[in-house]
Image (cartoon, helix red, strand yellow):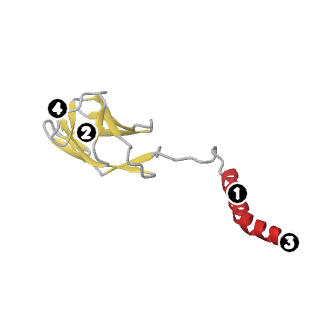
Amino acid sequence: MTAFFNKFSKGFLPVLLAILISSVLLLSCDKDELEIQNDFPFEVTVMPVPAAIANGNTVEIRLTIQPTGNYNNTQYFIRYFQFDGQGTLRYYNEPPYQPNDLYGIPARQFRLYYTSNSTVSQSFEVWISDNFGNEKQLSFEFNSSD
């Protein structure tokens, strides 16, 4: 009987140990606590811009989107609205943006170009958002140098 018990315990011990380890691992994994984060808030830094602009002149605005984490599938968008003066805002050599239309931003570091079309002070706001609903608002004001 002892020989049977020794054979049984030697063959059964690894199986019992595997079942015990599997049970502990499965019971310790709570699905409610497992979270994969893909929504990262972001900040936008802007290099200094001139305080004044003359009619017909262009100002370069350098921007950098700085997310708090790294998720490769995040998409960024831009829209703007000008409420004082007249001018155009564009991305590099692309056609000028239309106010309140949404445009994709292909890179986290980019440049916008604002061209004045008036002889009065000008103000506009730029909203940068991502595909998760995070949004940052930037305000720009230029005095007329005419």
Q: Position of residue 108 (x, y in %)?
A: 32, 48
Q: How much space separates mark 4 and mark 3, taking CA atoms?
A: 100 Å
Left or right, 129 with respect to 84, comes to right
What element does badge 4 sit on?
loop
- Residue indicated by mark 2: 143
Q: Which residue is mark 4?
A: 117
**Residue pointed to by mark 3:** 2
Q: Earlier in the sequence, mark 3 or mark 2?
A: 3
Which mark is first along the chain, 1 or 4? 1
Front residue of this view, candidates 122 and 31: 31
Task: Work out how far the residue at label 3 is from the one at label 2, CA to CA, in angstroms.
Answer: 99 Å
Find residue 87 and report its image quarter: top left
Work out whether mark 1 precedes mark 2 in sequence or the reverse, and give the earlier one. 1
What's the residue at 81%, 68% (across, down)? 4
Mark 1 or mark 3, which is nearer to you?
3
Label 3: element kind: helix
